[in-house]
Image (cartoon, helix red, strand yellow):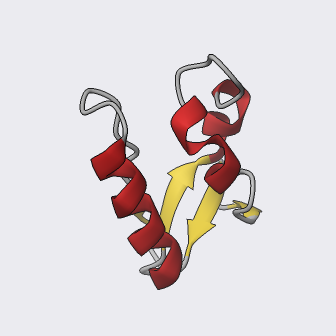
Amino acid sequence: MNYLILTEENLTTLNNLNTTGDPLRRCEPITLTDGRSALNADLLNDCGPGQTWAHYGSFLQTLPVETVS
């Protein structure tokens, strides 16, 4: 599965975005088996202008994508 990998700095930015966006739409990271935080990379398919995750779009597009099995 493809994931967007989050650093500690990214987690802070994500928390800030979660507090300023729609309270019913929050991006919540998971913890991978190696301890890193990540979001499902499928979010990139729905983060353009007017789409579900548009509030996070610019941020999500800066994150590295990694395939994790």
Residue 24, quarter of picture: top left
- Spot occupied by residue 49 in the image (x, y as percentages of width and height): 69, 23
Q: Quadrant of the C terminus?
A: bottom right
Depicted 59 relative to depicted 21: above or below: below
- Spot occupied by residue 63 in the image (x, y as percentages of width and height): 69, 63
In screen coordinates, is 40 left or right of 34? right
Q: How many marks?
A: 0
Residue 25, quarter of picture: top left
Query: Which residue corresponds to the image point at 46% horizontal and 67% vertical from the top-left?
Result: 13
Residue 41, quarter of picture: top right
Q: Nearer the viewer, residue 54 or 2?
A: 54
Query: Which residue corresponds to the image point at 33% horizontal and 30% vertical from the top-left?
Result: 22
- Spot occupied by residue 39 in the image (x, y as percentages of width and height): 52, 53
Q: Nearer the viewer, residue 25 or 36?
A: 25
- Spot occupied by residue 1 in the image (x, y as percentages of width and height): 65, 48
In screen coordinates, is 63 left or right of 12? right
The reply to whether residue 44 is in sight is: yes
In screen coordinates, is 48 left or right of 51? right
Depicted 42 relative to depicted 51: above or below: below
In the image, farthest residue toward the front: 20
Q: Nearer the viewer, residue 5 or 14?
A: 14
The reply to whether residue 32 is in sight is: no
Query: Which residue corresponds to the image point at 28% horizontal and 50% vertical from the top-left?
Result: 19
Q: Nearer the viewer, residue 34 or 10?
A: 10
